[in-house]
Image: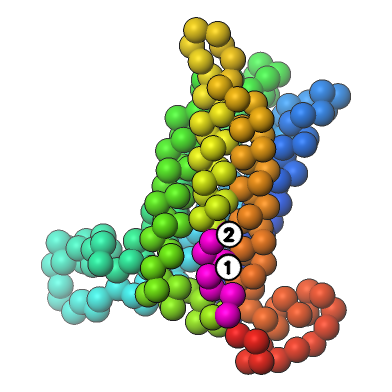
Amino acid sequence: MRPIAWMAWLFIMGSACFAVGVPLSLVTTISPVVAAAVFFVGSILFTAAASIQTWLARTTLPRVGIDASLWLRARRLFDVRNVAWTSAWVQWIGTLFFNSTTFRALRDAVDAGSVSNQLVWFPDAAGSVLFLISSGIACLPEVRAHRHGHARNRSWLIVVLNLVGSVFFGLSALGAYTLPTTDQLVNVTWSNGGTLIGALCFLFGAWLTLPTTTRAASRGTSTSMGGTA
């Protein structure tokens, strides 16, 4: 349960950074560097959590002998039939795009005092698409059985929250596109609202993913994990 708890807490903290970053970016008295830095930290936490999730998914990969060829080992890693693994590494790559997005935004804020959406939009959109694909795959029963064996009664709510969060992140990416003709965002409300709502969905989904004993301890109570999982 310890790796699952670490993964969930990292997703919680990363989601909280994205949620907090939205109101920070709207406060004109605060430097845009602050919000950009919070978003960047959130993306790093997402990558750390996704790395643990990918590591946990390794058990779904078919076994190969120690004398297996490099080709067979590569097929083992990228065989799309291993859906839990596929969902995990697709999301992991998506987090790398968000690393790029938020780092470029932070660098832009430091250098120019503002964030250029032209600069950061593409990796933001690509990351959102990969999150949506990963969340869709995660709805499959075999993925849910692998990830949520400790939380079977919460499994559907977890995957729905993650799927909805991915949809809102995609909406945020769409709203953040800067029209070349006007140099204006497609929709500021979509950009900010999508990020905020998506982050809150991810946060709640990650909270539900925590092992029951961990969630109980964080509330200052003691309860048996087996009683509700």
19 sits left or right of 92 in the view: right
Asked if labels 2 and 1 touch by Cβ distance under 8 angstroms, the answer is yes
User: Is 223 placed above or below 107 here?
Assistant: below
Spatial separation of the CA atoms under disc 1 and disc 2: 6 Å
26 sits left or right of 192 in the view: right
Q: Percent x, y for residue 204?
A: 67, 61
Residue ID for mark 1? 157
The total number of labels drawn is 2
Magenta stretch in the rendered image? 153-161
- The residue shown at (82%, 23%) is 28
Residue ID for mark 2? 161
Q: Secondary structure at mark 2?
A: helix
Circle 2: is it few (<14), some (14-19), or many (20+) Cα within 10 Å? many
- The residue shown at (70%, 18%) is 113
Q: Percent x, y for residue 93?
A: 42, 49
Query: Which amino acid type corresponds to the residue marked 1 in the rendered image?
Result: Leu
Q: Percent x, y for residue 44?
A: 58, 49
Q: Is residue 37 visible?
A: no
Picture disc at residue 147: none
Most distant residue in the top direction: 181
User: Is 142 placed above or below 86 here?
Assistant: below
Circle 1: is it few (<14), some (14-19), or many (20+) Cα within 10 Å? some
- The residue shown at (15%, 76%) is 67
Asked which quadrant contains residue 229, the reply is bottom right
Asked which quadrant contains residue 66, the reply is bottom left
Query: Which amino acid type corresponds to the residue marked 2 in the rendered image?
Result: Leu
User: Is 192 placed above or below 89 here?
Assistant: above
